[in-house]
Image (tube, rainbow, N blue to C red):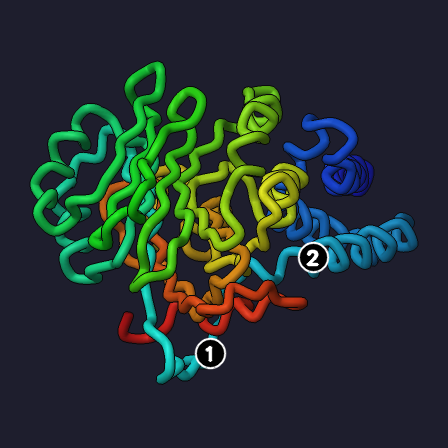
Amino acid sequence: MMAQLTFLAMTAFSAALLAGFFGALHPAFDSFSHFRMHLSLLTALLALPLLASSYRLQAVAALVFAIACFATTTGALPRLSPQAVAKPTDRMVYSLLQMNLRFNNPTPKKVLSLIGRTNPDVITLDEVSGMWATELGYIKDAYPYRILCDYPNGVFGVALLSRRPFAAGTAPHCEPRGAMAIATIDFSGIPVDVAAIHLSWPWPKEQYWQIGELAQPLAALGETAVMAGDCNAVPWSAAVRRVARLGGLTLMPSAGPTWIHRTLPDFLRRYAGLPIDQVFSKGGVAILSSTRLEDTGSDHLPVLVEFTLRPDDKPQEEHESALAANDLPGK
């Protein structure tokens, strides 16, 4: 009886795993893809005891399938021994800090302290509530170039803050329902479109149609651009691939899991959470590294990205911005 129940559970998890690969057909399938790592592990764990039962052949097939599925997610896992990349000496190195602030974060001073210590050139923020509009005012002198976009419920807006000026003749703007903020920033004479994005939850929530609503703003991003935000979707999902395709963007390899339910400890977030904070780029942007930083009271970990700009803005055949180091020591 126990073997039968285990077999049924293994079959159910395998079916959910398979459904996740058909996310392009319907967003309901894509919802399963976000839990591919977890479903793969559960399927494998259930298959192991069945190897000694009459279901051994089915268990072997499920085990191989689970391993193959898990292999498609390994780019989102933190590296145990990351290698630092040598920073170029002939180009400026810039930094971008991506943070989902959490609308009711009980420790906003931790966020401001982290910003002060990392001193990024530009900051992309999600879940910017009315409380955060006040808190971010304390660093207005350090980040005078900014735009805050309100969400209809006043909770899930986005913001973009910069130490560097907006390019001459341009003005930052908000896209539908405060889900995206865009500004053209002058990086030492090179104009770069920088965007902050915050997508809703996957199906049955409105993520699928929200991406469609943002199709035109994504397509309008300049030839050289970088975009970061809480996509509420994992790197291998159809949703993230769709965002990248609409914007002509390349998805940066993940820094690792960044979100888990806030009642669970930070350690679990780093190794069993979901990698849903994404960074995209195109054109002259070359990503050097991506680092998850310490907890600041949100249910997301901040991500600090370092990048350079090629003055010729020639696109690359292969993304030279391939992630060089995750969670670098001493960051």
| Rendered image quadrant of residue 4 | top right
Quadrant (top left, top right, bottom left, bottom right) of the C terminus: bottom left
Where is residue 95 shown, x and y percent of the image? 32, 62
Look at label 1 and name its amino acid. Answer: Ser
In the depicted structure, whether residue 66 falls above or below residue 159? below
| Rendered image quadrant of residue 44 | bottom right
Q: Which residue in the rendered view is the most extreme toward the front?
A: 169
In the depicted structure, whether residue 206 falls above or below residue 215? above
Look at label 2 and name its amino acid. Answer: Thr
Secondary structure under the numbered disc 2 in the rendered image: loop
Residue at numbered disc 2: 72
Where is residue 59 shown, x and y percent of the image? 84, 52
Could you tell me how far apart the alpha carbons at marks 1 and 2 are, in whole angstroms? 20 Å
Residue at numbered disc 1: 81
Q: Nearer the viewer, residue 37 or 311?
A: 311
Quadrant (top left, top right, bottom left, bottom right) of the N terminus: top right
Residue 56 in view here = yes
Secondary structure under the numbered disc 1 in the rendered image: loop
